[in-house]
Amino acid sequence: MDLLNTLVDKGLRRETPTREEALAVLATSDDELLDVVAAAGKVRRQWFGRRVKLNYLVNLKSGLCPEDCSYCSQRLGSKAGILKYTWLKPEEASEAAAAGVAGGAKRVCLVASGRGPTDRDIDRVSQTIETIKEQNEGVEVCACLGLLSAGQAERLRDAGADAYNHNLNTSEATYGEITTTHTYADRVDTVHQAQAAGLSACSGLIAGMGESDEDLVDVVFSLRELDPDSVPVNFLIPFEGTPLAKEWNLTPQRCLRILAMVRFVCPDVEVRIAGGREVHLRSQQPLALHLANSIFLGDYLTSEGQAGQADLDMIKDAGFEVEGAGTTTLPTHRADALAAAVSGAGCGTKAAAPAGGGCGSHTEAGGGCGSHAGAGGGCGPCGGHAPAPAEEAAPSPRTDLVTVRRRGAGTDLAPNA
């Protein structure tokens, strides 16, 4: 296909595709799907080889959230029967993190429900970060605490945090359908604060709420402009007891097309398959490794994932390898730009980019839970958008694949790692 040849050429040069090209990827037929995966796989291998980065979630504080994000099992008014507990102690969090590291995780993601941290919360999380770093040599730590206030990103950086996650989730035009308690602009501001402090920015999206192709392309192009180092792609887990419990709009084929589109638009960024991969990709998960270079190991925030050993077996059987602790995840040009930002932390500048800018490279500098994969992984839009492409029949709900997490952090049971 001329379209795929063009997209591969652009991806290898870190050039931005057009919106029309991105939309065309989402509109490809099932007969063309393997060609799409193969093409995006060339771009993935150019920048990340056959490495797969493993990330491990630790839910520091579960439920009890005052935000009303429509997708989320931890939202205000949620009837989902999830675990609810207040802050884990630093030693408890470190013990949970160690299980993930032992399973091969290179990055530990510390997540807490809520609108955003108080200064006391930052003190608490800082102690947790320091404890984890002391007890797990070489581990990366990403914090995900919601909307940040002035100076909080710098304090997390000083405590040893490497990254900060806060997802955009959907287009600015439709963001008001998610929640009434914070805005799209609040989210963008938090990502900018993390970048200005020298933290590696992690920001992504969530798919599966009945959104249109245009919505998906809008948010991915916004992410390219925002230029995070990693982009988690979440697929809604429709929890009973949430407003989106009946939103079963994804097939494995559509998930693969979405991941391919993200890879083409953000060719040299760490694309992570986050919440919902087991529920919606199912037996096609190995194919998705040709598109994304990062996954979560084991369980999510409030739902269970497949066994950690199954993740490791899948990676090996598909011909990929787990990225080692001594390997730099990002391509050299992005890693160098991040290092420059860290060394000049506070100025918020990044290295100049070649033509194309966006996720392909850094550019010259001139609310809510914001979570990683959890109830649906990140905050996502509520329903009411256009339906999925006509060639895909509505999938049957697979509620048997949605299991509330009852083990690991906040329980007396061993974690899944």
Image (cartoon, rainbow, N blue to C red):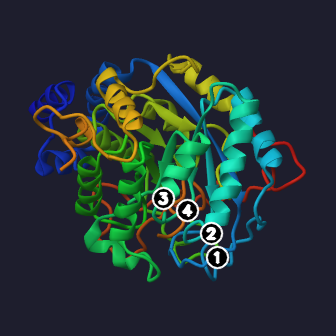
The residue drawn where x is 25% and y is 44% is 29
User: Counting residues from the N terminus, which is met first, the one under dot 4 or under dot 2?
Assistant: 2
Q: Residue at x 29, y 30 (%)?
A: 40
Q: Nearer the viewer, mark 4 or mark 1?
A: 1
Residue 381 on image: x %, y % = 41, 69
Q: In the figure, is residue 78 to the left or right of 407?
A: left
Task: Find disc 4 in the rendering and name its residue.
Answer: 397
The image quarter containing residue 269 is top left
User: Which mark lies nearer to you, 4 or 2?
Assistant: 2
> Residue type at mark 4?
Pro
Q: For label 4, count other residues whose C-alpha is less than 10 Å away and answer few (under 14), some (14-19) or many (20+).
A: some
- Amino acid residing under circle 3: Gly
The label number, if any, that marks residue 151 in the structure image: 3
- Residue drawn at point x = 76 percent, y = 47 percent: 93
**Is tag 2's residue or tag 1's residue first in the polypeptide sequence?**
2
231 displayed left or right of 377: left
- Residue 241: which disc? 1
Residue 97, located in which quarter of the rendered image? top right
Q: Position of residue 258 (x, y in %)?
A: 34, 47
Disc 1 crowd rating (10 Å Cα; few below 14, some 14-19, many 20+) is some
Do the numbered discs 3 and 4 sit on residues whose CB atoms are within 8 Å?
Answer: no
